[in-house]
Amino acid sequence: MFEDLTQKLETVFKKLRGQGKISESNIADSLREVRRILLDADVNYKVVKQFIDDVQKRSVGQEVLTSITPGQLIVKIIFDEMVNLLGSKSAEINFSQTPPTIIMVAGLQGSGKTTFCAKLANHLKNKGKFPLLVGADVHRPAAIDQLEMLAGSIQIPAYSSRSKSALEIASESVAQARQGARDVLIVDTAGRMHIDEEMMQEVEAIKTRINPHEILFVVDSMTGQDAVTTAKAFHDRLQFNGVVLTKLDGDTRGGAALSIRAVVNKPIKFVSIGEKLDSIEVFHPDRMASRILGMGDIVTLVEKAQEHFDEKKAKKLEEKLRRSEFTFDDFLDQLREVKKMGSLDQIIGMIPGLNRIPKNNALDDRALIRVEAIIQSMTPEERRRPNIINGSRRRRIALGSGTTIQEVNKMLKQFAEMQRMMKTISKGKLPKIFNGMRINN
């Protein structure tokens, strides 16, 4: 997420922190570089100008120029102003006191709108809500099929029709929600490859008919400033309540994320990272600014861990660790728990400092896939007692996992080392479970 932007800003910050004395001249030089970086990231030029002006006003004050660590103070100012740019605080869904809460989702075709509807439904279901998904996109081929398939995968009901208009479907869905005791209605509307009058008239008519409590505009964050232009056009017609940024796990330069809130003056409410239906996050401006500036996001990482935390499994694992009985089956369980939290790129990006690790040295998802394949190619007895794995067994495991004997040997050696480390648990020391568990590409 924002890898290129983060690395370039880190270079500027390193220079600032390394200077013992700060003057108005070198502040101006640094901010010129920041301006160039933001423009290269496709941030709206008016937004960049205002941002740089705000930072400069605070940076040339006496408090900064006489500070013992002026470089660090300027970085803190940039962080504060970026938080302000992104919205200062997170914004919640506007739930109605009288159910169902009606959420209308709009955006261009290809923005990830339909998938986001399912992600939002899954997110709200996990929060104790009872959503109903509504397929009101009757123009895109297979749009209704896609929504129904996604709804089925998360065991949430969907309502639509292949013989009625979008307006009729949206209107009838409100009664369907009440009859089915569903307290949230998520309406997926039609999109186009570009803005056209027919589409706008249809979504306006749906808005008038169902009177939604919340309108969310979904935007592909990879489209840069074009996303801001589209958002403004939609807002002029719909007056939406919030923005959703999708595809933040792609080649995102940052332009949309840093520009859109300032241009339409509406909060970013959710971000979508990855293809899985649980890859959705409530947008927190301070956490996002921290990620962009290379400071990590430990709070979100802890929240993700808590979401997938199984207290019974953890207690059972702790007992096994104390008895030094940690097996390959236990390790496989832990790998799968980590994978539930998202890709390793996302997890590493949340840990301060790890974003600086070169890609070819970082633990990646492909490495974990190979580790998992090796373990799954073992027999139950081999997983419990790896010391019985002789030469012929190693050849069979390598063949079954699509790896080499050398990789299997390395894996076994590392696991033996890790088992020895586990014995230190009873002495109150915390082992670095994943230290060295990388199999080279």
Image: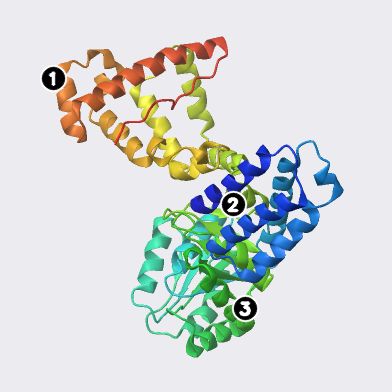
Whichever of callouts 2 and 1 sits on the residue coming sooner in the sequence is: 2
Q: Which residue in the structure is indicated by mark 1?
A: 392
Secondary structure under tag 2 reads loop
Q: Is residue 94 left or right of residue 144?
A: right
- Residue at the spot 35% in from the left edge and 16% down from the top edge: 416
Question: Which residue is the extreme one toward the top?
Answer: 427
User: Do the CB atoms of the residues marked 2 and 1 lie less than 8 Å apart?
Assistant: no
Q: Amino acid under label 3?
A: His
Q: How many marks?
A: 3
Quarter of the C terminus within the rendering: top left
Q: Residue furthest right?
A: 62
Q: Position of residue 421 (x, y in %)?
A: 45, 15
Numbered tag placed on residue 127 in the rendering: 2
User: Which residue in the protein does label 3 denote?
Assistant: 235
Q: Position of residue 214 (x, y in %)?
A: 63, 70
Q: Residues within 10 Å of mark 2 (few under 14, many from 20)?
A: few
Labelled pair 2, 3 in contact (Cβ < 8 Å): no
Measure how far apart labels 2 and 1 are at the Cα level. Answer: 51 Å
Give whichever of 195, 427 is nearer the camera.
195
Amino acid under label 2?
Lys
- Point out the frontmost of discs 2 and 3: 3
